[in-house]
Each structure stands twice: as C-alpha cells, then as structure tokens.
Amino acid sequence: MPKGNLYVVSGPSGAGKSTICRLVRKMLGINLATSATTREPRTGEVDGRDYYFLTKEEFLKKRENGDFLETATVHGNYYGTLKSEVENRMVKGENVILEIDVQGGLQVRDQYPGANLIFFKTPTENDLEARLRGRKTDSEETIQLRLANSIKELEYEKEYDITIINHTVEQACNELKKIIEEKSK
Ligand code: ADP
Ligand code: 5GP
C-alpha cells in the first residue's frame, strides 16, 4: 500500500504558517487538512475550507467519539485534527500538511513516528508583533495573548526536526518546498 508523507507545521501565531503553507500547497498540489475549532470565524473565513467551526458541545462530542487524531486548547479555544482529514489521504499515498500547535504536533508524532515536524518562527520578536498587528484580524487582547503564548511555544522548537526562519515569503516557501520535495524522492 503506498503511503504519503505527513508534515506538521507549528510555531507562534503570526510566524507565517498559513501564508507559507497555502502557497506551498498550491505549488505542490498538497492537501492542507482542515482542522476543527471552537473559535469564532475571522472575517472572510469559510466553514469547511479554513476550519470546521464547531460549538464546544459539537467538538467535545466528536472528541468522545474518537474522531480526532489530536486535540489541544490553544489561546483559550479547542482545536483538533480530524482523523478523516488525514488517514484516507495518506493511505492513497498523498502528502498531508498539518498546520497545528506544538502540543498537537507532539501528539501526532506519538502516533506517526515518521511525521516530519517543522517549526516556523520570525527573525525577531519585534517581527512577530509587527506581523500579528499587520494581519489586522485580531483584537489587542488577542494579540497580547498570542504574544504571551509565543514565549512558551518557542520552547518547543528543540523538539522539532527542523526550523524555518520566515525572513521573506519567497525564502520560507522555497525552504518548505525543498524539505517536502527531498522527502518525496
Ligand atoms: P500564522 O498562520 O503563523 O499565524 P500568518 O500566515 O497569518 O501567520 O502570517 C501573519 C502575518 O504576517 C500575515 O499578515 C502575513 O501576510 C504576514 N507575513 C507572512 N510571512 C511574512 C514575511 N516573510 N514577511 C512579512 N510579512 C509576512
Ligand atoms: P488560529 O486561531 O490563528 O487559526 O490558530 C491558532 C493556533 O492553533 C495556531 O498555532 C494553529 O497552528 C493552531 N491550530 C490550528 N488547527 C489546529 C489543530 O487542528 N490542532 C492543534 N493542536 N492546533 C491547531
């Protein structure tokens, strides 16, 4: 049975994970598995495309049913990867990218020891703050929470297989693309 590779991309909020993964996914025709979350949709986000937006009750019911590969509480909301988003694709030999937090990344590695764990960060803390603000999607309170959490998240970098420092979109895309292409040879 052919097996696809599994890539886990983590790092502080604002590090550029969605931007870079979206571009690389397009370039290589790779699926980004859609996660489930209990957080409110941001302007422009579409249910089923950006996330499956669930109520807390719906999320907990799915967790009880064993529908998730991993779950975590991040910035005060539940997030989780549905097994249905990952397993079928891997069995078909497709590569899958999971864009999830560090707690989830380690849970995935427990279940798939061959998963490739990739950590994203900005060149400096000031860049992280500037990019979070520049995104214009979050309230001041949310930005402060995400910046505070970034310090804890950065401690997990050492658990990851490789780090990409997101200096420019082009450079970070090229690095991620190269890692995936090398593994797929
Ligand atoms: P994450 O998914 O890790 O939370 P995003 O992809 O939303 O981060 O990126 C945060 C913000 O930074 C977005 O506004 C994005 O356009 C911007 N951004 C991403 N990469 C870069 C970069 N290399 N240089 C400048 N801005 C960037
Ligand atoms: P955001 O709310 O900005 O979309 O995501 C916040 C954080 O939740 C990010 O670190 C993101 O990677 C993480 N996240 C998104 N989906 C999942 C998931 O399915 N599982 C886990 N563990 N984290 C996730």
Image (tube, helix red, strand yellow):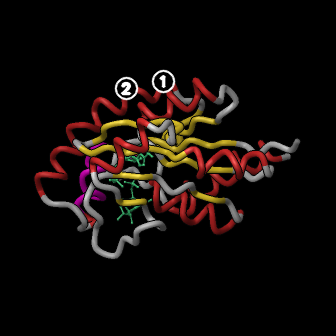
- Which quadrant of the render holds ligand 1? bottom left
Q: Secondary structure at mark 2?
A: helix
* Element on which disc 1 rests: helix
Q: Position of residue 126 (x, y in %)?
A: 26, 48
- At label 1, which amino acid type do we have? Lys
Q: Considering the image in quadrants, where does the N terminus appear?
A: top right
Residue 30's x, y, as percent?
67, 60
* Mark 1 to mark 2 CA distance (whole Å): 7 Å
**Residue 5 showing in the rendered view:** yes
How far from the left and from the top, in percent, is residue 168?
A: 48, 59
Task: Report the residue at 47% width, 66% height from top.
Answer: 48
> Residue at coordinates 59% horizontally, 52% vertically from top-left?
85
Q: Are marks 1 and 2 in contact (CB under 8 Å)?
A: yes
Q: Is residue 33 left or right of residue 123?
A: right
As shown in the figure, which amino acid type bears the numbered disc 2? Glu
Q: Position of residue 162 (x, y in %)?
A: 58, 34
Instruction: Tell me: residue 33, above or below residue 157.
Output: below
Residue 123 seen by the camera: no
Mark 2 packing: few (<14 Cα in 10 Å), some, or many (20+)?
few
- Residue at 34%, 41% in the rendered image: 60
**Residue at horizontal 37 percent and vertical 43 percent from the top:** 61
Residue assigned mark 1: 158
- Majority secondary structure of the magenta segment? helix
Residue 47 placement, left or right of 116: left
Q: Which residue is mark 2?
A: 155
Q: Which residues are magenta?
A: 122-133
